[in-house]
Structures are given as C-alpha cells and as structure tokens.
Image (tube, rainbow, N blue to C red):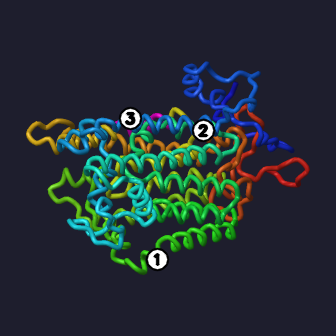
Amino acid sequence: MPSAEMTPAGVHEPEPVRPSDAEPVRPTREDEVAAAGSELIGGPIGRRALLGTTWWTPVRVIALVAIGMFALGLVQKAPCYHSAWFFGASSQYTHACYSDIPHLYQGRGFADGLVPYFDKLPGDMDYLEYPVLTGVFMEVAAWLTPGSGSIQHQEQWYWFANAGMLMVCTAVIAVCVTRTQRRRPWDGLLVALAPAFALTSTINWDLLAVALTAAAMLMWSRGRALAFGVLLGLATAAKLYPVVLLGPLLVLCWRAGRWREYFQAAGGAVVAWLVVNLPVMLFAFQGWSKFYTFSHDRGIDFGSFWLIWAQNSSNPPTTDFVNTAATVLVVLCFLGIAALTFTAPRRPRFAQLAFLMVAAFILTNKVYSPQYVLWLVPLAVLARPKWRDFLVWQACEVAYFLGIWMYLAYTTSGDAHKGLPTQGYHWAIAIHLLGTLYLCAVVVRDILMPERDVVRRAGDDDPSGGVLDGAEDVFVLGTAARPARHAAPFEAPQVAWGRPEQRPHEDRSL
C-alpha cells in the first residue's frame, strides 16, 4: 500500500470527506512503536473492539498513569529525602536526586516566616528570585508545613507539600493535553510516560507554569480566546517562557485574518498578568523586580552551549554579550518562524509553532536547566505525536539529566573526583541540545511537507488551533500563494492539503 510520501499529488476531488470528530485515532494502528509497545498490555486494539463501554476512558487512564509516573519520580528522590539533601556535599548528585525545594525552604526565608518580595532576606540573595505566582505557590506550601521539629523535618515536609501540589499540576497537564486534540486522546500517554518528565518534576516549581500553559492551549483549541489569554497571563506570572506563545499565535492569526481573537487573547494575557503582579509591583517593587534583575545579571550557567564556549575559551563571553546575543538569536528565530508561517504550503498548526518558539527560547538561553524539558513535553506531544521521535528526544534528555548530576558530583567531591569530568559534561550538553534540535527539525519538515505530519495524515487540519482550524488564508507569501496539494495516506480518506475543508452541502473547496 503506498505511503503519503509515495502518493503523487492528484486532481482535486469534488467532495473530499474528513473523518468524523467522533472517530478517535488509535496509535497502535498508525504508529509502529506504539503497536510494538502495546504487546506488554495485550497488543494493538482489534477491529471489533468495543470502545467507550467502560469506565476506563482515555482521560482517566492517562491521568492515573501520569500520577503513577510522578510517584515513581518521588521514589527516585528517596535517597535524598532521607539523607542526601542534608548530609554530604556530593551525595545528592551521585544519587541524581537533587531538588531546589528543600534547600530554598530555609534559604529563602520560608522557615522564618518571612513574606516573599516584602521582607528582605539575609545572605547574597536579598529577595525571592521567582515570579510572583510561583512565590505564592511556594508560600502556600510553607503554610502547609508544620513549624515544629528540626529544620530537616520541616524541609522534608515542605518538599512533600510541594510534591503534592505539583502532582495536581501533573494531572492537569495530562488531562489538558489528552483533551486538546479531540481525535487523538491517546497521545496524552506520551506526556504521562515521558521519563524526563518524571525525573525532573520536583527539581523546581516549573510544573505550575506548564499546567497553566497546557490549560491555555486547551482553551484555545475550544475557540475560547479570552480564557486562553487569561490562563497564559497567569502562566507568565509563574514563569516567563509562556509569553513567547503570543508570537507564533500572532503570525498564525495574521495569515488567517483572525485579529479579533488574537487581540482578545493578548488583552486577556496582559490583564491577568497585571492582576497578579501589580499589587506586589506597587508595594514591594524592589522585591518584585528581583526576578528580572537576577535573570539579566545571572551569568552563563548549566546546560547551554554558551557554557561549552566559556569553559573552552581563554576569553569567555561576558554576561552582557550573552544577554545581547541571546536576544538577537531569539528575535532571528521568531523572524524565521514568521517567514516559515507565511510561506509554508499549508498554514502550520499552532502547537508546531509553539513548540518551535519555546525550543528556540531555551536553546539560545544562557541556561538550560534539566527541568526546562517540562516546558517542552506537552508542546512536543501536540506538535509531533510520534513515539519514535519523542523517545529519541527523551533518551537525550535522560542522558543529560544523569550527566549534569555526575558533573556536579565531580566538582563537589574534592580530590576524589567522583563523577563526570568537564569534557564529559560538555558531551552531555551536546547530546541534549542535539536531541531538541532533532525534534525541531522534524517539526519543521512536517510544516514544509504537510503529508509527513501524522496529525494531518488522519485528515485533521489544526485540532489544537481553535478558530484557526479549517480557516481560510488571507495573507500568504511565496509558494504558499500557490500551494501544492498532497494526498493523505491511501488508507485514509482523501484530503487535498493547502485549502480549507469542503464539507457536504457547503460551497467551499479544500
């Protein structure tokens, strides 16, 4: 049976038929890796299987699997919970179970009842260096922590309180990704089973912003632009990266002429961000601005290609140079994504551009912490729900997860030199950068060759695109003005790419 790549562009059919929204895509029927993996639980689903007749819906199954994997991640931190966070300089690294959470309970004044942003801290860090909504999250966990007992006992409780709240965020992420693309609910298993997701979930507080961003993506997929904007503004109040999603959305709405929805989304994001930040900004400006000044003044740090340059150069780049260069690179990436959007033979899917923009933001940054993979996992699943590519990328991230802790073990173990030396760590950085670049390259290929996009092969346009799904183009450039028409896989209903969908009884062509 010929594949999509082998099928030549054909004559436009008079009434192409798109699969019903009620017909879900079964990964074990279209993904060879998923089919092989399903042998562990009985094999691929059969043609005569009775679907939708049990309590075990995809959303419930995936949410429970995500919680189970999160729990395994907690078990992986057990050596640190019992001793390594508190005794020995390098044992938390040799066990690969480091977390910022217990250390910052005392280091950022929560143990002493200090109010974030308002009360000055002793030591080098004079104020909490996290965005306001993350600071609120940290403070709520401190309220749930008993104030009696030894400081070690309190830090253990604080980590557990945060872990419980982050587990809720994990369930929210899994549910939102599962429901964003209606016909592909089982893609959510990629999030639930992602090993790097489980390993890095409790290193820091990133899951709060990731959950809010996933919820925003769900709202946009349902055509609720204002709700998307509000949730994205809240996510940006928890972490800076979600704001970059407004860039890809701008060019997509420009190509589709959906300005009203874009301004609703952008306006909602600005208002929601201001509601959270303005009170602290007005009454504790110095504390509020600490996150931004710290981010600007922070030197080159772990995981970035800048670190490889700095550690292999007799004249390493300065922080000011890196700040400027990283900004220029991000702007160039956005311009490249904009050009790709306007010239692609078919308008890219929102999730594809969102993944590319966040990945560009991370890859060019002066720090690429191991938990930043959490930002990308939900977007990667929506952009490229292919098990092989996803697992290749995850393998690279797991290798880096082990590499950074072994490197820190090496640098903190004195003359013993337990762990990975500097050159070995540089290889670990290169592996995880190349893994992310590989996934970006595959997504770009899908945009340039829509017939290679597994989501569109099933007959969909942009199931996470909301008002963009099936919308006609009003502004295109170059070859996009004369789109090639590619056939879907022969087994699937015929779809002519590059034009809006023609539905029965409507005078439109696809």
Q: Please, what secondary structure does the residue beneath circle 3 have? A: helix
The residue where tag 1 is placed is 279
Q: Is residue 445 visible?
A: no
**Up-down relation of residue 453 to residue 254 (above or below):** above
At label 1, counting other C-alpha atoms closer than 10 Å, the crowd grade (few under 14, some 14-19, many 20 or more) is few
Q: Please tell me whether mark 2 sits on a helix, a strand or a loop.
A: helix
Residue 342, image x, y percentages: 61, 60
Say if the magenta span includes residue 451: no
Q: Is residue 393 magenta?
A: yes
Residue 37, position in %: x, y? 54, 24
148 vs 134, left or right, is left
- Which image quarter: residue 488? top right
Residue 131 visible (yes or no): yes
Residue 75's label in the rendered image is 3
Q: Main secondary structure of the magenta part?
A: helix
Magenta-tinted stretch: 390-399
Using the rendered view, name the quadrant where residue 403 is placed: top left
Q: Check the picture and name the quadrant holding the N terminus.
A: top right
Q: Nearer the viewer, residue 441 or 184?
A: 184
Q: Mark 2: which amino acid?
A: Asp
Which residue reaches farthest bottom? 282
- In the displayed structure, does residue 214 sit left or right of residue 470? left
114 relative to 378, above or below: below
